[in-house]
Image: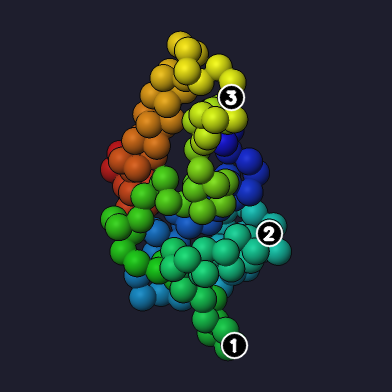
Amino acid sequence: MMELTRKGEYAVRGIVYLAGKPLDKVCLLSDIATAVDVPPTFLAKIFQQFSKIGLVKSFRGTGGGFMLGRAPENITLLEVVEAVEGPIIPNRCVVNPLDCGRAGYCNVHPVWKQVQEKVRGVLEGVTLKELATGDK
């Protein structure tokens, strides 16, 4: 993944909105979707995925909705992006050097590894709290 998909963009918008709310406040999906301009059905699927891995908590029934799964300073942008987009992979050889017959003598492979590490490092260095408060 080198370019964020629409799903990734929507996921970030939705969870950053939640990160700006009090940790104990349950937000209606419709309110979140309206606030961040994301189709509610699309956001529901993303948040269900987040719920399975603990990034958000979901509550059913009257008064149901979503809240952040843990404190926003303990959730990085990397976690959010990789939860919807999968691992950050600038080139397939980074996943498995054996997939590439040139792995033993390719001078570009170390560059792809460095790109991957730097992108992951930048995303890992940003928390949802920083994004929600604009403190970055």
* Amino acid type of the residue that numbered disc 2 sits on in the rendered structure: Phe
In the rendering, which numbered label is found on residue 105? Answer: none
Picture coordinates of residue 102 (x, y %)?
55, 17
Q: Foreground mark, 3 or 2?
A: 3
State left or right for residue 113 relative to residue 71: right
Badge 2 marks a residue whose secondary structure is helix
Q: Going 49% across and 47% down the picture, which residue do you hit? A: 81
The mark nearer the N terminus, 1 or 3, is: 1
Disc 1/disc 2 C-alpha distance (Å):
20 Å
How is the model colour-coded? rainbow
Q: Earlier in the sequence, mark 1 or mark 2?
A: 2
Q: Is residue 53 above or below residue 36?
A: below
Indicate which disc residue 100 carries: 3
Q: Secondary structure at mark 1?
A: loop
Other-residue count near label 3 (Cα within 10 Å), few / some / many at <14 / 14–19 / ≥20:
few
Residue at 51% in and 76% down: 58
Question: Which of 108/36 is in front?
Answer: 108
State how far apart marks 1 and 3 are (Cα). Answer: 51 Å
